[in-house]
Structures are given as C-alpha cells and as structure tokens.
Image (cartoon, helix red, strand yellow):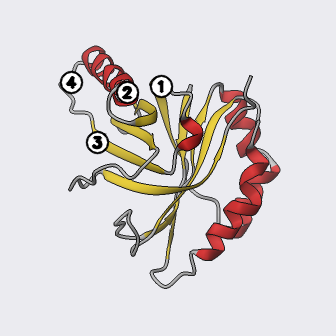
C-alpha cells in the first residue's frame, strides 16, 4: 500500500466555498476508483474548528496498489487539478499498517501528524510500535481509519487518522487537523 497527499495553501481571504463546491461536484468521480482504498477530500480553514494556520485543500489517498496511483496521476482527474491550481508536489509514504473500520463512511474529520525519524531509531521497533498504535486508535480511541507509514527519502513517519467527530486538538507543530468534504470509497461488497 502507498499513502499519498498533495496540498494547496490558499490565501487568507480565499473563498473556501469554491473548494467546497469543487469537492461536491468532483468528489464522487473517484468513488470506486480501481486500487483506491480511500480518498479523503480535506480542507482546513484559519477560522473554523480545525484551528489551521492556513487555508488548505489537501486530499489524502490510500492506494492498495501503485497501479491506482499511476492511473490517477497520469489521468484526466489529476490533469484537471494541475490545470486549476498548478502541479503540486506529491508526498508519498510506504504503509506499515492501515486499519479501516466498517464505520469509515462516518468520518468527518482527519488528522495528519508527520515527524522525523531519528538516525539511531530501530526501524523494526518503530514499525511495530506504529502498527500497534494504528490498530489501537481504531479499536480503542475512536478513529474510524488509521494509517501509519514512513518515507525513507526524508526519514519521516506519518500518522493519518479519520474520525467520526472532532478529536481533541493537541498543541503539536507536526499535527494538522482537517474537515472531510467527501470520502471516496470502493463499492461495498
């Protein structure tokens, strides 16, 4: 699995309703997209409950296979995003653990925490810990989905969570909270 996110920082006075309308119109186009576990259409605003420092549009994807990522990035949907906002830099992470509950469709908020992996860190131990944390967050802590992953290019780890309600906000420089405008999922079996 591969986790992927790109982000657009928008001006403080930007009409975020434009982004909301785009999500409403375009979001369902990725429902049932091949090899996509989910896509969360994320926004954060300076003046809403996410307490963001910036206005953001920052979709997050969990791909079951790299073919899906390739088909999306090389396809018409991503070309349209790039034409509207400019081609973004895409962050990717190798997934250690993805926990998705049956309640995923109830998600309304997301959190993303990125932190550095120190050079002396045992990767095996970190993988075990982060995988257990993802499972515990879904089983015991109210998350409806959890992704733990890492990027060996810049040695960072990510904790991405979907929530059915606003989680407690922590004062953490690496933590970003988002609202979910649409969640694209595979067809239920």
Between marks 2 and 1, how big is the CA–CA gap?
A: 7 Å
Callout 4: helix, strand or loop? loop
Question: Mark 3 or mark 4: which comes first in sequence?
Answer: 3
Please state, as top left, top right, bottom left or bottom right, where the N terminus lies in the image: top right
Residue in view at x 72 percent, y 28 percent:
188
* Any part of residue 94 in sight: yes
Rendering quarter of residue 154? top left
Question: x%, y% of residue 114?
Answer: 34, 44
Which label sits on residue 121?
4
The residue singled out by tag 2 in the image is 134
Is 105 on the left or on the right of 152, as rendered?
A: right
Q: Nearer the viewer, mark 3 or mark 4?
A: 3
Residue closest to the eye, 33 or 156: 33
Question: Mark 1 or mark 3: which comes first in sequence?
Answer: 1
Q: Are marks 3 and 4 in contact (CB under 8 Å)?
A: no
Callout 2: helix, strand or loop? helix
Between marks 2 and 3, how big is the CA–CA gap?
A: 15 Å
Is 104 on the left or on the right of 126, as rendered?
A: right
Q: Are marks 1 and 3 in contact (CB under 8 Å)?
A: no
Q: Are marks 2 and 1 in contact (CB under 8 Å)?
A: yes
The residue singled out by tag 3 in the image is 115
Q: Are marks 2 and 3 in contact (CB under 8 Å)?
A: no
Between marks 2 and 4, how big is the CA–CA gap?
A: 19 Å
Question: x%, y% of residue 133?
Answer: 31, 26
Q: Are marks 2 and 4 in contact (CB under 8 Å)?
A: no
Between marks 3 and 4, how big is the CA–CA gap?
A: 13 Å
Question: Mark 4 or mark 1: which comes first in sequence?
Answer: 1
The residue singled out by tag 1 in the image is 99
Callout 3: helix, strand or loop? strand
Residue in view at x 23 percent, y 18 percent:
122
Task: Give the farthest residue toward the right.
Answer: 76
Q: Are marks 4 and 1 in contact (CB under 8 Å)?
A: no
């Amino acid at each position: 699995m591969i986790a992927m996110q790109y982000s657009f920082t928008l001006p403080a006075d930007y009409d975020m309703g434009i982004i909301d309308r785009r999500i409403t119109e375009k979001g369902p186009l990725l429902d049932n997209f091949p090899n996509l576990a989910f896509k969360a259409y994320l926004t954060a605003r300076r003046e809403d409950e996410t307490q963001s420092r910036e206005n953001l549009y920052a979709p997050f994807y969990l791909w079951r296979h790299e073919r899906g990522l390739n088909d999306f990035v090389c396809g018409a949907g991503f070309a349209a995003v790039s034409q509207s906002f400019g081609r973004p830099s895409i962050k990717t992470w190798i997934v250690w653990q993805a926990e998705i509950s049956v309640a995923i469709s109830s998600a309304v908020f997301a959190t993303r925490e990125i932190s550095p992996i120190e050079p002396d860190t045992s990767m095996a131990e970190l993988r075990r810990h982060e995988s257990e944390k993802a499972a515990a967050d879904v089983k015991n802590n109210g998350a409806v989905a959890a992704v733990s992953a890492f990027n060996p290019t810049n040695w960072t780890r990510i904790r991405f969570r979907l929530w059915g309600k606003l989680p407690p906000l922590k004062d953490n420089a690496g933590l970003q909270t988002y609202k979910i405008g649409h969640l694209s999922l595979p067809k239920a079996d």
